[in-house]
Amino acid sequence: QKEVEQNSGPLSVPEGAIASLNCTYSDRVSQSFFWYRQYSGKSPELIMSIYSNGDKEDGRFTAQLNKASQYVSLLIRDSQPSDSATYLCAVNIHTGGFKTIFGAGTRLFVKA
Amino acid sequence: DTEVTQTPKHLVMGMTNKKSLKCEQHMGHRAMYWYKQKAKKPPELMFVYSYEKLSINESVPSRFSPECPNSSLLNLHLHALQPEDSALYLCASSQEAPGSEKLFFGSGTQLSVL
């Protein structure tokens, strides 16, 4: 089993809709969870971090964490064409040092 | 300054060449990382430095040799690479504390090995 699993997509949503991205992880002791956005030809940039069970909102983005189910999700409300990118779920694993492991990424297309 | 600067942006090298990738940050971060990313794949961790000491080596071949001369600089020395090593090499930095492991990435070096 991979440490971080995501549906690679592509996920296609119309402009203005809610995009829902999901991720599961295998390491039960992980405490830190992240969503990075990567545009084609660019490096990843952090958009959300979450450490506690529940929801965390930042503008149009909401991250959700359920440690019992080992599940992290990202909701993007009022999706815009500029949100079209690959979204990488990342989990921090403590194994003698901090180690951030990425899922395969979900490609999101927002149609105008 | 919230930037991680990587040089060069592009590099083409032969299999017998020796080259180095450089990375610099001035955010006071004490953890620095090298990742390798192939097209349409996620970043894959190579090395982690914590307080200038190598803390994680993800079984990377010895033709890749990392170096951390000080807390702001990270190098990756390349020697006798193979064509399959062609990829985007990303440097990142973060705080070294639980709850602060957000990665700040440089723009990467696109490496082609001929």
Image (cartoon, coloured by chain):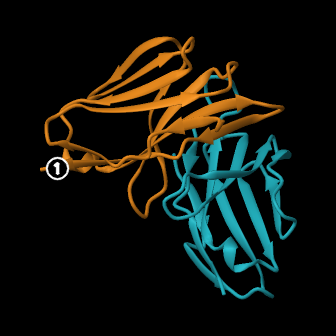
**Height in image: A53 above or below A102?**
above
User: Where does label 1 land, which residue?
Assistant: A111
Nearest to the observer: residue A92 or residue B18: A92
Q: Please report the residue visible at 65 percent of the width from the left and 52 percent of the height from the top.
A: B44
| Residue depicted at 42% across the width and 26% down the height | A73
Q: Quadrant of the N terminus of chain A?
A: top right
- Image quarter of residue A30: top right
Q: Label 1 amino acid?
A: Lys
For chain B, the rendered hue is cyan
Picture residue at 29% right of the left edge, 50% below the top: A84
Chain the render paints orange: A
x and y percent of residue B65 in the render? 83, 64
Helix, strand or loop at label 1? It is strand
Residue B75 versus residue B58 in the image, above or below: below
Residue at left offset 78%, top offset 73%: B78
Of residues B89 and A10, which is closer to you in this image?
Answer: A10
Q: Position of residue B33 (x, y in %)?
A: 70, 49
In this rendering, position of residue B12 left or right of residue A47: right
Direction from residue A108 to residue B101 in the image, left or right: right
Residue A88, x across and y down, in percent: 48, 42
Position of B21 relative to B49 (above/below): below
Residue A49 percent location from the top left of the image: 49, 28
Q: Label 1 marks which chain's residue?
A: A
